[in-house]
Image: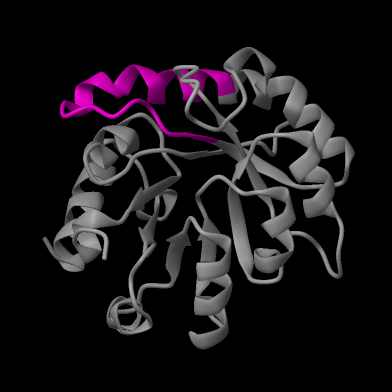
Amino acid sequence: MSFEEISERVSLAVERSGRAPGDVTLVAVSKTKSVEEILAVYEKGHRDFGENRAQEMAEKAARLPDDIRWHYVGALQSNKARLIRPSTHLLHSMDRMSLASVWAKGQGIAAPVLIQVNTAEEPQKSGVVPEEAESLVDRVLAMGLEVQGLMAIPPLSEDPEETRPHFRWLAVLRDRIREQHPNVTDLSMGMTDDFEVAIEEGASFIRVGRAIFGARN
């Protein structure tokens, strides 16, 4: 599959859902990919790229054009936050107060964050459990950080329809939080195998890697 094919599928899913073209941002997840591979997609006009390792993202950001919008989409160790804070456009994986404390420190305004929610409460995954999400939003906002929305990584499934309830639940949770915090609007959900379903359920950001770049290097 190619970047152009994925872009077309995104456009069709947005249209089917009755949404506007600008409602969904495709984040090209470039983890393990070379600078040259990223540039090949950049030269097609794309600017939103995602990484899940702090050191790797910091090194790539230093070597690639300044107008790339870097999305950090993986679990982030607090002691690695300083590596990516200057170059991050949006942190998708805020999941605890210790990380928020580190993220709030440093020069300049910290990038906005999404609160990662472990919708299935899987022990091996990062993310706050759903019933604690609103409390974490409250506390992170109180620290002066901008909470832009929620993020989730549902259990892996070969059938995209099996992830739909998780996407729908995240949207319900977002709506509940938005009653108190109107600026908490975005949803980061959906990857290579289920991004069309995620768009149908209201995704603002979809994180697609393998379908654009191929298998991990």
- Residue 143, placed above or below residue 126: below
- Residue 22, placed above or below residue 203: below
Residue at the location (74% across, 27% down)?
136
Q: How many marks?
A: 0
Task: Left or right? Give the position of 192 relative to 96.
Answer: left
Task: Left or right? Give the position of 179 relative to 6.
Answer: right
Q: Is residue 157 magenta?
A: yes
- Residue 47, placed above or below residue 105: below
Q: Position of residue 125 (x, y in %)?
A: 49, 30
Q: Position of residue 111 (x, y in %)?
A: 70, 58
Q: Pick out the residue farthest to the left.
A: 1
Residue at the location (47% across, 60% down)?
51
Q: Position of residue 79 (x, y in %)?
A: 73, 55
Specify the quadrant that holds the N terminus.
Answer: bottom left
Q: In this view of the protein, which residue sits in the foreground, 153 or 6?
A: 153
Residue 65 visible in the shown view = no
> Residue 81, located in which quarter of the rendered image?
bottom right
Q: Position of residue 15 (x, y in %)?
A: 24, 44
Residue 184 visible in the shown view = yes
Residue at the location (33% across, 70% down)?
33
Residue at the location (49% across, 77% down)?
60
Q: Is residue 93 magenta?
A: no
- What range of the chain is rendered magenta? 151-173
> Residue 215, located in which quarter of the rendered image?
bottom left
> Residue 21, located in which quarter of the rendered image?
bottom left
